[in-house]
Amino acid sequence: MQSFSDLSLSPEIQRAIQELGFETPSPIQAQTLPILTGEKTDFLGLAGTGTGKTAAFSIPLLERIDATSKKVQALVLCPTRELALQVSGQINLLGKYKGLRSAAVYGGSSFGDQVFALKQNPTIVVGTPGRVIDHLDRGTLALDGVRTLILDEADEMISMGFKDELEAILGRVPREEANTWLFSATMSREVRRVADTYLRAPKQVQINKKEMLSENVEQLYYVTQESNKPEILCKLIDAAEDFYGIIFCQTKALVMDLTDYLNGRGYKVDCLHGDKDQRGRERTMQAFRDRKVQMLVCTDVAARGLDIDELPHVINYELPRTPEDYIHRIGRTGRAGKPGTAISLVSASEVPYLVDIEKLIRLQVEQVIVPGFEPEYDYCYPPGDKRTHHRRPSAPPSAASAPFASARSDRATGRGAQREGSSRSGNGRMAHVAADGFDFSKPYESRDTLPVTAATGSNGGKSLAHSEQPHKPRRPVAALLGGLGRK
Ligand code: AMP
């Protein structure tokens, strides 16, 4: 399938697709639409966020709905309130010329408003599992008319602990008459079990991991000592023309410490972590969407469902421990054809995670070393890995080389290094020289280097050096490394 007009879609849906500006189907759409618009079948789609999966199921779903019926004919389950709102919004846009609308039901918001919305006889309900169960228990939602059940981001729903709720809902849908379409970025054992138990002879489409990563996302990683991460991060932020992005950390403690540190350095930063209540979360997200804050520091869980259409930057301050999370993280940039840059800061102890990620995405991520911030010892792959070990660059880099590229290791001559000589200025891409004059192509010489002694934290009291410009951090850098024991 080359174009949307290759399918016999109704003129109303074709018009809505056109209005949304979707010209060419994405890979998941190209493979899924012919199946789901053609026959009544259960379906298993392996595709993650940012692949266009929402339209891949919404278009055939809308073609199935009988606009004259007053019953709920489709239920879409999503892991988060944000995703539920997004999916509901996209269904409404695609369904508008057919006169079809969805109602969204999710936790953390007024029950009464949702009951009112459900009384308007929506044909499609999009919701989070917990709140859907609440409505079922109170009798404000009935599923007897449901003919299509969609589990969106099933792996996320399961990893967030919604397995029991999912199974309870699956048990209340008339499964003899209904089709179940399950979408998941990954096929974990639990997802496989749910699929095996609840899907009947599903047709399956799998977008390979490489296709799931947008080609518009430039992926780089910086080899660095753990203690240099705060400084390098600031340099990267300054080097971007107009930094607007998400910075991922592994723990809530580090999220809080890094946020304090970056605020102390004068950036407009907020954070999302598991302890923020719904209201605080919404405020933060609104401020980020309105660009009142330029960066959000997040844990993986807190960033779920966060969808910003034009997000140029994602930084992995720490690599995720599960390689699939890398795909989730960097899938937040490079959406809808927009360019993006995904940068990971990788210390020697994180190399095994990088190796797993590269295996999963079947791509060598381009390696960059900031001169003056080389790792303490030769950076090497785990025993048995046949790739060449990195050696520190011996000569000062040439200014004529590509931005950040001066100290590229021999890895950069591999598959990931197609961009030698390309310019990263403009379009939100990283520039060569930071706003404070720091030139990445020259060895780093800090003018205001202060020794900061870590009294606590996992750093074990090591003396760290970092530049104090432009503002003095409120917390010692050491706090960023060990989270002050708050992990
Ligand atoms: P999703 O993976 O469904 O969250 O979609 C990611 C983004 O891509 C959303 O902003 C969609 O509006 C957009 N999108 C989906 N399909 C297409 C398409 N065929 N062409 C351009 N943009 C699309």
Image (cartoon, rainbow, N blue to C red):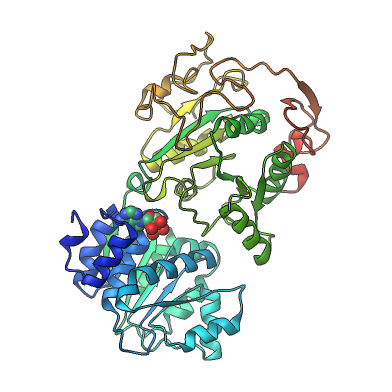
- Answer yes or no: is residue 481 visible: yes
* Identity of the residue drawn at 59% across and 34% down: 237
Q: Residue at x 53, y 36 (%)?
A: 344
Looking at the image, which residue sits at the far right?
455
When asked about the image quadrant of residue 303, the answer is bottom right
| The quarter of the displayed image where residue 28 is located | bottom left
Q: Nearer the viewer, residue 382 or 337?
A: 337
Q: Is residue 480 left or right of residue 369?
A: right
Please identify the quadrant where the N terminus is shown.
bottom left
Residue 427 point in image, percent of width and height? 44, 37
Q: Residue 130, how many percent across, how many down?
A: 55, 76
**Which quarter is ligand 1 in?**
bottom left
**From this viewpoint, is residue 48 visible?**
no
Name the foreground residue: 389 vs 5: 5
Residue 255: x and y in percent read 67, 47
When the figure is inspected, residue 60 is found, relative to residue 292, above or below; the finding is below
> Within the image, what quadrant is residue 43 found in?
bottom left
For the residue pair 76 and 263, the one nearer the viewer reads as 263
Up the image or down, 143 lies above or below 95; here it is below
Total marks placed: 0
User: Where in the figure is residue 415, as x and y percent of width and height?
Assistant: 34, 29
Residue occupying the point 40% across, 45% down = 338
Q: Nearer the viewer, residue 335 or 158?
A: 335
Residue at 42% x, 77% y: name it.
102
